[in-house]
Amino acid sequence: ITIAPSPTKPIEGQKTGTSGLRKKTAIFTSENYLANWVQSLFSSLGSEIEGQTICLGGDGRYFNKEASQIILKLAAGNGVKKVVVGQNAILATPAASAIIREQKLYGGLIMSASHNPGGPDEDWGIKFNYNSGEPAPERITDEIFKYTETITELKFADIPDVDLAVVGTTEFDGFTVEVVESTADYLPLLQEVFDFDMLKSLISRPDFSMKFDAMHAVTGAYAPKIFCEMLGAPESSVMNCGVLEDFGGGHPDPNLTYAKELVDIMYSGDDAPDFGAASDGDGDRNMVLGKGFFISPSDSVAMIAANAQECIPYFKDGLKGVARSMPTGGALDKVAEKMGLQFYEVPTGWKFFGNLMDDGRCSVCGEESFGTSSDHVREKDGLWAVLSWLSILAKKNEGKAAGEKLVTVEDIAKEHWAKFGRNFFSRYDYEGVESEKADAMVDHLRSVIASAKKGDKFGEFELDFADDFEYTDPVDGSVASKQGLRFVFTDSSRFIFRLSGTGSSGATIRMYIEQYETDPSKLEMDAQVALKSLIDVALETSKLQEFSGRDKPTVIT
Ligand code: VG1
Ligand code: CO
Protein backbone atom coordinates (compact mmCIF):
# COMPACT_ATOMS: atom_id res chain seq x y z
CA ILE A 1 0.00 0.00 0.00
CA THR A 2 1.31 3.45 -0.83
CA ILE A 3 0.38 6.38 1.30
CA ALA A 4 -0.66 9.61 -0.34
CA PRO A 5 -0.49 12.08 2.56
CA SER A 6 -2.57 15.18 2.23
CA PRO A 7 -1.97 18.40 4.17
CA THR A 8 -4.65 19.71 6.49
CA LYS A 9 -5.25 22.31 9.20
CA PRO A 10 -6.94 22.00 12.59
CA ILE A 11 -10.68 22.63 12.65
CA GLU A 12 -12.24 24.08 15.77
CA GLY A 13 -14.82 22.38 17.93
CA GLN A 14 -14.19 18.68 17.26
CA LYS A 15 -14.84 17.75 20.86
CA THR A 16 -16.74 14.56 21.62
CA GLY A 17 -20.03 14.85 23.53
CA THR A 18 -22.07 12.29 25.49
CA SER A 19 -21.74 9.78 22.69
CA GLY A 20 -19.23 10.64 19.98
CA LEU A 21 -18.89 13.68 17.74
CA ARG A 22 -22.20 14.99 16.38
CA LYS A 23 -22.69 17.91 14.03
CA LYS A 24 -24.83 19.01 11.15
CA THR A 25 -24.17 16.82 8.11
CA ALA A 26 -23.01 19.83 6.11
CA ILE A 27 -20.22 20.36 8.64
CA PHE A 28 -19.06 16.77 8.36
CA THR A 29 -19.11 16.89 4.56
CA SER A 30 -17.07 20.10 4.52
CA GLU A 31 -13.42 19.75 3.53
CA ASN A 32 -11.43 17.37 5.74
CA TYR A 33 -13.84 17.63 8.68
CA LEU A 34 -14.40 13.89 9.02
CA ALA A 35 -10.89 12.99 7.89
CA ASN A 36 -9.34 15.31 10.50
CA TRP A 37 -11.23 13.63 13.33
CA VAL A 38 -10.52 10.10 12.13
CA GLN A 39 -6.84 10.89 11.58
CA SER A 40 -6.71 12.40 15.08
CA LEU A 41 -8.20 9.22 16.47
CA PHE A 42 -5.58 7.06 14.75
CA SER A 43 -2.78 9.46 15.69
CA SER A 44 -3.84 9.44 19.32
CA LEU A 45 -3.75 5.64 19.35
CA GLY A 46 -0.25 5.81 17.85
CA SER A 47 1.63 2.58 17.23
CA GLU A 48 -1.00 0.67 19.21
CA ILE A 49 -3.32 0.65 16.20
CA GLU A 50 -0.74 -0.75 13.75
CA GLY A 51 -1.47 -4.27 12.58
CA GLN A 52 -4.85 -4.31 14.34
CA THR A 53 -8.34 -5.18 13.17
CA ILE A 54 -11.28 -2.84 13.72
CA CYS A 55 -14.91 -2.86 12.64
CA LEU A 56 -16.93 -0.20 10.87
CA GLY A 57 -20.64 0.32 10.45
CA GLY A 58 -23.47 2.69 11.09
CA ASP A 59 -27.14 3.40 11.15
CA GLY A 60 -27.62 3.77 7.39
CA ARG A 61 -27.97 7.54 7.41
CA TYR A 62 -27.05 9.89 4.58
CA PHE A 63 -23.25 10.25 4.06
CA ASN A 64 -22.39 6.92 5.76
CA LYS A 65 -21.36 5.30 2.48
CA GLU A 66 -19.02 8.10 1.44
CA ALA A 67 -17.71 8.39 4.99
CA SER A 68 -16.89 4.66 5.00
CA GLN A 69 -14.58 5.06 2.02
CA ILE A 70 -12.76 7.96 3.68
CA ILE A 71 -12.37 5.95 6.87
CA LEU A 72 -11.11 2.84 5.04
CA LYS A 73 -8.42 4.84 3.25
CA LEU A 74 -7.29 6.44 6.50
CA ALA A 75 -7.33 3.13 8.33
CA ALA A 76 -5.10 1.56 5.70
CA GLY A 77 -2.84 4.61 5.68
CA ASN A 78 -2.40 4.44 9.44
CA GLY A 79 -1.34 0.81 9.52
CA VAL A 80 -4.61 -0.90 10.41
CA LYS A 81 -4.41 -4.46 9.10
CA LYS A 82 -8.07 -5.23 8.57
CA VAL A 83 -11.49 -3.61 8.76
CA VAL A 84 -14.65 -5.69 9.24
CA VAL A 85 -17.51 -3.69 7.69
CA GLY A 86 -21.25 -4.29 7.95
CA GLN A 87 -22.91 -4.85 4.55
CA ASN A 88 -23.80 -1.49 3.01
CA ALA A 89 -21.98 0.01 6.01
CA ILE A 90 -24.91 -0.97 8.22
CA LEU A 91 -24.34 -2.11 11.78
CA ALA A 92 -26.56 -1.33 14.75
CA THR A 93 -24.56 0.08 17.66
CA PRO A 94 -25.05 -3.04 19.84
CA ALA A 95 -24.17 -5.22 16.84
CA ALA A 96 -20.87 -3.39 16.41
CA SER A 97 -20.21 -3.91 20.11
CA ALA A 98 -20.97 -7.62 19.70
CA ILE A 99 -18.57 -7.94 16.75
CA ILE A 100 -15.74 -6.23 18.65
CA ARG A 101 -16.23 -8.59 21.58
CA GLU A 102 -16.82 -11.78 19.65
CA GLN A 103 -13.89 -11.30 17.26
CA LYS A 104 -11.67 -9.75 19.95
CA LEU A 105 -11.05 -6.67 17.79
CA TYR A 106 -9.05 -3.64 18.77
CA GLY A 107 -12.16 -1.48 18.48
CA GLY A 108 -14.63 -0.10 16.01
CA LEU A 109 -16.06 3.02 14.44
CA ILE A 110 -19.80 3.65 14.45
CA MET A 111 -21.25 6.21 12.08
CA SER A 112 -24.42 7.49 13.68
CA ALA A 113 -26.07 10.49 15.22
CA SER A 114 -28.40 8.05 16.94
CA HIS A 115 -31.85 9.51 17.55
CA ASN A 116 -31.11 12.74 15.66
CA PRO A 117 -32.70 13.06 12.20
CA GLY A 118 -30.55 12.30 9.15
CA GLY A 119 -30.07 13.80 5.69
CA PRO A 120 -28.07 16.60 4.06
CA ASP A 121 -29.75 19.23 6.26
CA GLU A 122 -29.83 17.15 9.43
CA ASP A 123 -27.24 15.44 11.59
CA TRP A 124 -24.28 13.14 11.26
CA GLY A 125 -22.04 11.60 13.88
CA ILE A 126 -19.24 9.20 14.62
CA LYS A 127 -17.85 7.45 17.66
CA PHE A 128 -15.05 5.09 18.54
CA ASN A 129 -15.64 2.00 20.63
CA TYR A 130 -12.77 0.29 22.35
CA ASN A 131 -11.71 -3.33 22.77
CA SER A 132 -14.41 -4.58 25.09
CA GLY A 133 -16.99 -3.03 22.79
CA GLU A 134 -17.61 0.03 24.97
CA PRO A 135 -17.78 3.67 23.88
CA ALA A 136 -14.29 5.13 24.25
CA PRO A 137 -13.61 6.43 27.74
CA GLU A 138 -12.87 10.11 28.26
CA ARG A 139 -9.12 9.57 28.50
CA ILE A 140 -9.22 8.49 24.84
CA THR A 141 -11.73 11.08 23.59
CA ASP A 142 -9.77 13.86 25.33
CA GLU A 143 -6.64 12.68 23.58
CA ILE A 144 -8.39 12.65 20.18
CA PHE A 145 -9.52 16.22 20.79
CA LYS A 146 -5.94 17.32 21.52
CA TYR A 147 -4.81 15.91 18.19
CA THR A 148 -7.62 17.69 16.33
CA GLU A 149 -6.13 20.96 17.58
CA THR A 150 -2.67 20.39 16.08
CA ILE A 151 -3.26 18.12 13.09
CA THR A 152 -1.24 18.86 9.94
CA GLU A 153 -1.49 15.76 7.75
CA LEU A 154 -3.96 13.09 6.67
CA LYS A 155 -2.42 9.70 5.99
CA PHE A 156 -4.62 8.43 3.18
CA ALA A 157 -3.74 5.10 1.57
CA ASP A 158 -3.84 5.16 -2.17
CA ILE A 159 -6.51 2.49 -2.64
CA PRO A 160 -9.73 2.47 -4.66
CA ASP A 161 -13.20 2.52 -3.12
CA VAL A 162 -14.37 -0.87 -1.86
CA ASP A 163 -17.78 -2.28 -2.82
CA LEU A 164 -19.59 -2.55 0.51
CA ALA A 165 -22.80 -3.95 -0.95
CA VAL A 166 -21.40 -7.45 -1.39
CA VAL A 167 -20.44 -9.77 1.46
CA GLY A 168 -16.86 -10.92 0.97
CA THR A 169 -13.21 -10.02 1.33
CA THR A 170 -11.12 -7.51 -0.62
CA GLU A 171 -7.35 -7.85 -0.22
CA PHE A 172 -4.83 -5.11 -0.74
CA ASP A 173 -1.16 -5.46 -0.07
CA GLY A 174 -1.15 -5.53 3.73
CA PHE A 175 -4.73 -4.35 4.19
CA THR A 176 -7.98 -6.32 4.11
CA VAL A 177 -11.62 -5.23 4.03
CA GLU A 178 -14.12 -7.89 4.99
CA VAL A 179 -17.80 -7.12 4.38
CA VAL A 180 -20.04 -9.13 6.72
CA GLU A 181 -23.79 -9.38 7.09
CA SER A 182 -25.19 -6.74 9.42
CA THR A 183 -26.47 -9.49 11.72
CA ALA A 184 -23.02 -11.14 12.03
CA ASP A 185 -22.08 -12.21 15.58
CA TYR A 186 -24.97 -10.19 17.03
CA LEU A 187 -27.81 -12.50 16.07
CA PRO A 188 -26.01 -15.63 17.33
CA LEU A 189 -25.33 -13.74 20.56
CA LEU A 190 -29.02 -12.88 21.02
CA GLN A 191 -29.83 -16.55 20.44
CA GLU A 192 -27.48 -17.45 23.27
CA VAL A 193 -28.94 -14.86 25.61
CA PHE A 194 -32.62 -15.66 25.03
CA ASP A 195 -34.69 -18.81 24.72
CA PHE A 196 -35.88 -18.42 21.12
CA ASP A 197 -38.14 -21.49 21.37
CA MET A 198 -39.97 -19.99 24.32
CA LEU A 199 -40.22 -16.64 22.51
CA LYS A 200 -41.60 -18.40 19.46
CA SER A 201 -44.25 -20.14 21.52
CA LEU A 202 -45.56 -16.74 22.64
CA ILE A 203 -45.19 -14.85 19.38
CA SER A 204 -46.83 -17.53 17.26
CA ARG A 205 -49.92 -17.71 19.52
CA PRO A 206 -53.05 -16.61 17.69
CA ASP A 207 -54.20 -14.73 20.80
CA PHE A 208 -51.02 -12.63 21.02
CA SER A 209 -50.04 -9.83 18.69
CA MET A 210 -47.16 -7.39 18.56
CA LYS A 211 -45.94 -4.41 16.57
CA PHE A 212 -42.32 -3.37 16.21
CA ASP A 213 -41.49 0.00 14.65
CA ALA A 214 -37.99 0.33 13.19
CA MET A 215 -38.68 4.00 12.37
CA HIS A 216 -36.93 3.51 9.00
CA ALA A 217 -33.69 3.20 10.89
CA VAL A 218 -31.09 0.51 11.48
CA THR A 219 -33.21 -2.09 13.26
CA GLY A 220 -35.06 -2.44 9.95
CA ALA A 221 -32.07 -4.60 8.96
CA TYR A 222 -32.67 -6.90 11.94
CA ALA A 223 -36.32 -6.89 13.02
CA PRO A 224 -38.01 -8.75 10.12
CA LYS A 225 -35.40 -11.48 10.39
CA ILE A 226 -35.74 -11.86 14.17
CA PHE A 227 -39.47 -11.37 14.70
CA CYS A 228 -40.89 -12.77 11.47
CA GLU A 229 -38.40 -15.28 10.08
CA MET A 230 -37.07 -16.68 13.33
CA LEU A 231 -39.91 -16.17 15.80
CA GLY A 232 -42.86 -16.68 13.49
CA ALA A 233 -44.62 -13.31 13.78
CA PRO A 234 -46.70 -12.27 10.75
CA GLU A 235 -45.21 -9.64 8.48
CA SER A 236 -47.71 -7.10 9.78
CA SER A 237 -45.91 -7.29 13.16
CA VAL A 238 -43.10 -5.06 11.95
CA MET A 239 -43.37 -1.61 10.44
CA ASN A 240 -41.12 1.00 8.85
CA CYS A 241 -38.37 -1.56 8.29
CA GLY A 242 -36.96 -0.05 5.12
CA VAL A 243 -33.65 1.48 6.24
CA LEU A 244 -33.70 4.95 4.67
CA GLU A 245 -30.92 7.54 4.52
CA ASP A 246 -33.22 10.20 5.94
CA PHE A 247 -35.28 7.82 8.11
CA GLY A 248 -38.27 8.71 5.96
CA GLY A 249 -37.96 12.33 7.07
CA GLY A 250 -38.71 11.28 10.66
CA HIS A 251 -36.98 11.80 13.95
CA PRO A 252 -35.84 8.26 14.80
CA ASP A 253 -36.29 8.63 18.53
CA PRO A 254 -38.57 6.04 20.14
CA ASN A 255 -40.59 8.16 22.54
CA LEU A 256 -44.20 9.21 22.90
CA THR A 257 -43.73 12.25 20.68
CA TYR A 258 -41.59 11.01 17.79
CA ALA A 259 -42.92 7.44 17.58
CA LYS A 260 -46.46 8.76 17.25
CA GLU A 261 -47.45 6.31 14.53
CA LEU A 262 -46.77 3.35 16.81
CA VAL A 263 -48.21 5.08 19.87
CA ASP A 264 -51.49 5.72 18.02
CA ILE A 265 -51.70 2.05 17.06
CA MET A 266 -51.01 0.92 20.63
CA TYR A 267 -53.65 3.29 22.01
CA SER A 268 -56.29 2.43 19.40
CA GLY A 269 -58.49 0.46 21.80
CA ASP A 270 -59.32 -3.20 22.26
CA ASP A 271 -57.95 -4.22 18.89
CA ALA A 272 -54.53 -2.72 19.58
CA PRO A 273 -51.64 -5.18 19.67
CA ASP A 274 -50.70 -6.70 23.04
CA PHE A 275 -47.12 -5.54 22.78
CA GLY A 276 -45.50 -2.63 20.98
CA ALA A 277 -41.91 -1.49 20.69
CA ALA A 278 -39.69 0.84 18.72
CA SER A 279 -36.00 1.51 18.37
CA ASP A 280 -33.90 4.53 17.43
CA GLY A 281 -31.57 5.47 14.57
CA ASP A 282 -28.70 3.21 15.59
CA GLY A 283 -30.70 0.53 17.39
CA ASP A 284 -29.49 1.12 20.92
CA ARG A 285 -32.67 2.68 22.33
CA ASN A 286 -36.05 1.09 22.89
CA MET A 287 -39.56 2.03 23.83
CA VAL A 288 -41.88 -0.62 25.23
CA LEU A 289 -45.67 -0.37 25.25
CA GLY A 290 -48.53 -2.62 26.22
CA LYS A 291 -52.07 -2.28 24.91
CA GLY A 292 -52.80 1.36 25.77
CA PHE A 293 -49.99 1.32 28.32
CA PHE A 294 -46.56 3.00 28.39
CA ILE A 295 -43.59 1.57 30.27
CA SER A 296 -41.33 4.36 31.40
CA PRO A 297 -37.69 3.45 30.67
CA SER A 298 -36.71 3.92 34.33
CA ASP A 299 -39.33 1.33 35.23
CA SER A 300 -38.41 -0.90 32.32
CA VAL A 301 -34.86 -1.54 33.51
CA ALA A 302 -36.13 -2.26 37.01
CA MET A 303 -38.81 -4.64 35.77
CA ILE A 304 -36.37 -6.46 33.53
CA ALA A 305 -33.87 -6.76 36.40
CA ALA A 306 -36.53 -8.10 38.75
CA ASN A 307 -37.61 -10.79 36.26
CA ALA A 308 -34.30 -11.54 34.53
CA GLN A 309 -33.24 -14.63 36.42
CA GLU A 310 -36.60 -16.32 36.01
CA CYS A 311 -37.23 -15.42 32.38
CA ILE A 312 -33.91 -15.03 30.52
CA PRO A 313 -31.49 -17.98 30.26
CA TYR A 314 -28.39 -15.72 30.16
CA PHE A 315 -29.19 -14.66 33.75
CA LYS A 316 -30.08 -18.07 35.14
CA ASP A 317 -27.41 -17.78 37.85
CA GLY A 318 -28.68 -14.38 38.97
CA LEU A 319 -27.45 -10.84 38.38
CA LYS A 320 -23.98 -9.63 39.38
CA GLY A 321 -25.32 -6.20 40.08
CA VAL A 322 -27.30 -3.40 38.50
CA ALA A 323 -26.62 0.22 37.55
CA ARG A 324 -28.46 3.28 36.30
CA SER A 325 -27.50 6.76 35.24
CA MET A 326 -28.00 9.49 37.81
CA PRO A 327 -31.10 11.17 36.31
CA THR A 328 -32.80 7.80 35.81
CA GLY A 329 -35.67 7.14 38.23
CA GLY A 330 -34.87 5.05 41.28
CA ALA A 331 -37.07 2.02 40.56
CA LEU A 332 -33.93 -0.02 40.01
CA ASP A 333 -32.60 0.99 43.44
CA LYS A 334 -35.64 -0.62 45.04
CA VAL A 335 -35.09 -3.85 43.12
CA ALA A 336 -31.42 -3.92 44.12
CA GLU A 337 -32.34 -3.33 47.77
CA LYS A 338 -34.97 -6.05 47.90
CA MET A 339 -32.94 -8.57 45.94
CA GLY A 340 -29.63 -7.79 47.66
CA LEU A 341 -27.80 -6.76 44.49
CA GLN A 342 -24.81 -4.44 44.14
CA PHE A 343 -26.02 -1.11 42.86
CA TYR A 344 -24.26 1.77 41.07
CA GLU A 345 -25.27 5.26 40.00
CA VAL A 346 -23.21 6.69 37.13
CA PRO A 347 -23.31 9.86 35.00
CA THR A 348 -25.42 10.05 31.84
CA GLY A 349 -23.99 8.18 28.85
CA TRP A 350 -23.25 4.52 28.33
CA LYS A 351 -19.46 4.80 28.60
CA PHE A 352 -19.62 4.72 32.39
CA PHE A 353 -21.25 1.27 32.59
CA GLY A 354 -18.46 -0.49 30.70
CA ASN A 355 -15.89 -0.50 33.50
CA LEU A 356 -18.41 -1.91 35.97
CA MET A 357 -19.28 -4.71 33.58
CA ASP A 358 -15.67 -5.50 32.69
CA ASP A 359 -15.00 -5.74 36.41
CA GLY A 360 -17.89 -8.18 36.88
CA ARG A 361 -19.89 -5.78 39.05
CA CYS A 362 -22.98 -5.28 36.94
CA SER A 363 -25.22 -7.33 34.65
CA VAL A 364 -28.18 -5.11 33.83
CA CYS A 365 -28.22 -1.35 33.48
CA GLY A 366 -30.32 1.40 32.07
CA GLU A 367 -31.00 5.05 31.47
CA GLU A 368 -34.21 7.02 31.54
CA SER A 369 -33.53 7.99 27.92
CA PHE A 370 -34.95 4.73 26.56
CA GLY A 371 -31.65 2.88 26.99
CA THR A 372 -31.47 -0.56 28.56
CA SER A 373 -28.98 -3.36 28.21
CA SER A 374 -26.79 -5.94 29.86
CA ASP A 375 -23.24 -7.19 29.87
CA HIS A 376 -23.79 -9.33 26.76
CA VAL A 377 -22.42 -6.24 24.95
CA ARG A 378 -21.04 -2.89 26.12
CA GLU A 379 -23.71 -0.69 24.58
CA LYS A 380 -27.35 -0.20 25.17
CA ASP A 381 -29.35 -2.57 23.05
CA GLY A 382 -32.86 -1.83 21.82
CA LEU A 383 -33.63 -5.29 20.47
CA TRP A 384 -32.26 -6.88 23.64
CA ALA A 385 -34.72 -4.85 25.69
CA VAL A 386 -37.60 -5.81 23.41
CA LEU A 387 -36.65 -9.49 23.56
CA SER A 388 -36.29 -9.20 27.35
CA TRP A 389 -39.86 -7.95 27.66
CA LEU A 390 -41.12 -10.61 25.28
CA SER A 391 -39.26 -13.21 27.38
CA ILE A 392 -40.99 -12.00 30.53
CA LEU A 393 -44.36 -12.22 28.78
CA ALA A 394 -43.51 -15.62 27.30
CA LYS A 395 -42.46 -17.06 30.65
CA LYS A 396 -45.49 -15.71 32.51
CA ASN A 397 -47.81 -17.12 29.85
CA GLU A 398 -46.07 -20.45 29.38
CA GLY A 399 -48.57 -23.28 29.12
CA LYS A 400 -51.65 -21.02 29.00
CA ALA A 401 -54.43 -22.66 27.02
CA ALA A 402 -55.84 -20.88 23.98
CA GLY A 403 -58.50 -18.42 25.07
CA GLU A 404 -57.21 -18.21 28.66
CA LYS A 405 -56.51 -14.61 29.69
CA LEU A 406 -52.86 -13.78 29.11
CA VAL A 407 -50.65 -11.85 31.53
CA THR A 408 -50.17 -8.42 29.94
CA VAL A 409 -47.48 -5.74 29.99
CA GLU A 410 -49.78 -3.71 32.22
CA ASP A 411 -50.20 -6.63 34.66
CA ILE A 412 -46.43 -7.00 34.96
CA ALA A 413 -46.01 -3.28 35.66
CA LYS A 414 -48.78 -3.11 38.25
CA GLU A 415 -47.55 -6.20 40.01
CA HIS A 416 -44.09 -4.65 40.13
CA TRP A 417 -45.35 -1.39 41.64
CA ALA A 418 -47.37 -3.27 44.24
CA LYS A 419 -44.25 -5.10 45.32
CA PHE A 420 -41.59 -2.39 45.08
CA GLY A 421 -43.57 0.85 45.18
CA ARG A 422 -43.62 3.20 42.23
CA ASN A 423 -41.07 5.83 41.28
CA PHE A 424 -43.09 8.35 39.30
CA PHE A 425 -40.77 9.82 36.70
CA SER A 426 -40.95 12.36 33.95
CA ARG A 427 -38.47 14.16 31.73
CA TYR A 428 -39.11 17.47 30.01
CA ASP A 429 -36.91 18.34 27.03
CA TYR A 430 -36.62 21.88 25.74
CA GLU A 431 -34.90 21.47 22.37
CA GLY A 432 -33.22 24.15 20.31
CA VAL A 433 -32.77 26.73 23.07
CA GLU A 434 -30.12 29.38 22.43
CA SER A 435 -26.91 28.27 24.15
CA GLU A 436 -26.36 31.54 26.05
CA LYS A 437 -29.85 31.36 27.51
CA ALA A 438 -29.41 27.76 28.59
CA ASP A 439 -26.00 28.56 30.10
CA ALA A 440 -27.49 31.49 32.01
CA MET A 441 -30.10 29.17 33.53
CA VAL A 442 -27.39 26.72 34.57
CA ASP A 443 -25.40 29.54 36.18
CA HIS A 444 -28.50 30.61 38.04
CA LEU A 445 -29.07 27.07 39.33
CA ARG A 446 -25.44 26.80 40.43
CA SER A 447 -25.91 29.92 42.51
CA VAL A 448 -29.08 28.48 44.06
CA ILE A 449 -27.15 25.33 44.93
CA ALA A 450 -24.29 27.35 46.42
CA SER A 451 -26.60 28.95 48.97
CA ALA A 452 -28.96 26.03 49.56
CA LYS A 453 -28.85 24.15 52.86
CA LYS A 454 -30.43 21.05 54.26
CA GLY A 455 -33.92 21.74 55.55
CA ASP A 456 -34.64 24.59 53.13
CA LYS A 457 -38.20 24.57 51.87
CA PHE A 458 -38.93 24.32 48.16
CA GLY A 459 -42.71 24.52 48.04
CA GLU A 460 -43.92 21.62 50.15
CA PHE A 461 -40.59 19.79 49.73
CA GLU A 462 -37.79 19.88 52.30
CA LEU A 463 -34.27 19.83 50.89
CA ASP A 464 -31.92 17.01 51.80
CA PHE A 465 -29.07 18.21 49.57
CA ALA A 466 -28.37 19.95 46.27
CA ASP A 467 -25.20 19.49 44.25
CA ASP A 468 -23.54 19.14 40.87
CA PHE A 469 -23.23 15.38 40.46
CA GLU A 470 -19.69 14.02 40.50
CA TYR A 471 -18.76 10.39 39.90
CA THR A 472 -15.65 8.51 40.87
CA ASP A 473 -15.31 5.29 38.93
CA PRO A 474 -14.88 2.51 41.50
CA VAL A 475 -12.71 0.50 39.12
CA ASP A 476 -10.13 2.96 37.80
CA GLY A 477 -10.68 5.94 40.10
CA SER A 478 -11.33 8.37 37.25
CA VAL A 479 -13.52 11.32 38.17
CA ALA A 480 -16.30 12.86 36.06
CA SER A 481 -17.60 16.14 37.47
CA LYS A 482 -20.39 18.58 36.60
CA GLN A 483 -22.70 15.77 35.51
CA GLY A 484 -26.03 17.35 36.40
CA LEU A 485 -27.54 19.73 38.92
CA ARG A 486 -29.67 17.84 41.39
CA PHE A 487 -32.00 18.79 44.17
CA VAL A 488 -32.83 15.87 46.42
CA PHE A 489 -35.55 16.17 49.08
CA THR A 490 -36.01 14.40 52.39
CA ASP A 491 -38.80 12.19 51.01
CA SER A 492 -36.33 11.15 48.25
CA SER A 493 -38.16 13.18 45.60
CA ARG A 494 -35.71 14.81 43.18
CA PHE A 495 -35.45 17.20 40.34
CA ILE A 496 -32.43 17.42 38.11
CA PHE A 497 -31.31 19.73 35.33
CA ARG A 498 -28.64 19.11 32.73
CA LEU A 499 -27.80 20.21 29.23
CA SER A 500 -27.77 17.63 26.49
CA GLY A 501 -24.40 16.57 25.11
CA THR A 502 -25.71 14.93 21.94
CA GLY A 503 -27.15 17.87 20.02
CA SER A 504 -25.56 19.28 16.89
CA SER A 505 -26.45 22.93 17.43
CA GLY A 506 -28.01 25.14 20.12
CA ALA A 507 -28.83 23.66 23.52
CA THR A 508 -31.35 21.18 24.83
CA ILE A 509 -32.35 21.62 28.45
CA ARG A 510 -33.39 18.42 30.18
CA MET A 511 -35.43 18.54 33.37
CA TYR A 512 -35.90 15.25 35.25
CA ILE A 513 -38.56 14.86 37.92
CA GLU A 514 -39.01 11.96 40.31
CA GLN A 515 -41.17 11.05 43.29
CA TYR A 516 -41.50 7.74 45.14
CA GLU A 517 -44.88 6.41 46.16
CA THR A 518 -46.02 3.33 48.08
CA ASP A 519 -49.63 4.29 48.85
CA PRO A 520 -51.66 1.60 47.00
CA SER A 521 -54.42 4.07 46.19
CA LYS A 522 -51.96 6.31 44.29
CA LEU A 523 -49.92 3.73 42.39
CA GLU A 524 -51.93 3.93 39.19
CA MET A 525 -52.08 7.69 38.93
CA ASP A 526 -51.05 9.45 35.75
CA ALA A 527 -47.39 10.46 36.20
CA GLN A 528 -48.00 14.05 35.09
CA VAL A 529 -50.71 14.44 37.70
CA ALA A 530 -48.70 12.77 40.45
CA LEU A 531 -45.67 14.95 39.72
CA LYS A 532 -47.44 18.25 39.13
CA SER A 533 -46.42 20.05 42.30
CA LEU A 534 -42.77 18.99 42.04
CA ILE A 535 -42.67 20.02 38.37
CA ASP A 536 -43.96 23.45 39.36
CA VAL A 537 -41.30 23.77 42.05
CA ALA A 538 -38.55 22.76 39.60
CA LEU A 539 -39.73 25.26 36.98
CA GLU A 540 -39.90 27.99 39.58
CA THR A 541 -36.49 27.22 41.10
CA SER A 542 -34.76 27.15 37.72
CA LYS A 543 -36.65 30.13 36.29
CA LEU A 544 -36.59 28.04 33.13
CA GLN A 545 -39.37 29.90 31.40
CA GLU A 546 -37.79 33.25 32.13
CA PHE A 547 -34.33 32.21 30.91
CA SER A 548 -35.32 30.11 27.90
CA GLY A 549 -38.41 31.96 26.79
CA ARG A 550 -40.19 28.60 26.53
CA ASP A 551 -43.52 28.02 28.17
CA LYS A 552 -43.67 24.35 27.29
CA PRO A 553 -41.27 21.52 26.51
CA THR A 554 -40.70 20.01 23.06
CA VAL A 555 -40.92 16.45 24.36
CA ILE A 556 -42.40 15.04 27.55
CA THR A 557 -41.54 11.53 28.62
C1 VG1 B 1 -28.70 11.46 25.58
C2 VG1 B 1 -29.32 10.73 26.75
C3 VG1 B 1 -28.32 9.77 27.35
C4 VG1 B 1 -27.82 8.82 26.24
C5 VG1 B 1 -27.25 9.63 25.09
C6 VG1 B 1 -26.84 8.76 23.93
O1 VG1 B 1 -27.61 12.22 26.02
O2 VG1 B 1 -29.77 11.64 27.72
O3 VG1 B 1 -28.91 9.07 28.39
O4 VG1 B 1 -26.83 7.96 26.74
O5 VG1 B 1 -28.23 10.52 24.61
O6 VG1 B 1 -27.93 8.05 23.41
P1 VG1 B 1 -27.73 13.80 26.28
O7 VG1 B 1 -26.33 14.24 26.64
O8 VG1 B 1 -28.27 14.36 25.02
O9 VG1 B 1 -28.72 13.94 27.38
V1 VG1 B 1 -27.91 7.56 21.82
O10 VG1 B 1 -29.19 6.64 21.57
O11 VG1 B 1 -27.35 8.79 21.12
O12 VG1 B 1 -26.58 6.64 21.56
CO1 CO C 1 -28.98 5.64 19.83
Image: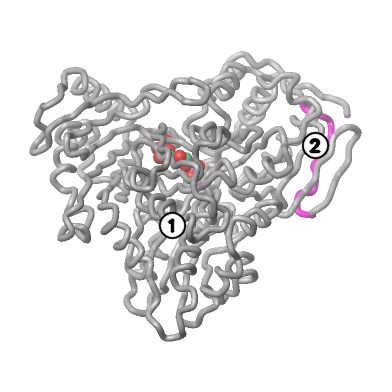
Residue 105 circle label: none
Residue 458 in the image: above or below residue 476: below
Q: Which residue carries the number 1 mark?
A: 307
Residue 170 lies within the magenta run:
no
- Residue 171 or residue 226, whichever sits in front: 226
Looking at the image, residue 101 sits to the left or right of residue 165; the answer is left
Q: Is residue 208 above or below residue 3?
A: below
Q: Is mark 2 within 8 Å of ligand 1?
A: no
Place of residue 365 in the rendered image (x, y in percent of width and height, measured from the top left): 46, 44
Residue 82's disc is 2
Most foreground residue, 370 or 205: 205
**Where residue 181 appears, x then y in whole percent?**
73, 54
Q: Nearer the viewer, mark 1 or mark 2?
A: 1
Residue at 61% x, 28% y is: 33
What stretch of residues is rendered in magenta? 156-166
* Quarter of the figure with the N terminus: top right
Disc 1 versus disc 2: distance between alpha carbons? 41 Å
Q: Find out whether the residues at labels 1 and 2 contact each other: C-beta distance under 8 Å.
A: no
Is 173 on the left or on the right of 70, as rendered?
A: right
* Dot 1 amino acid type: Asn
Percent of width and height locating residue 325: 40, 37
Q: Main secondary structure of the magenta part?
A: loop
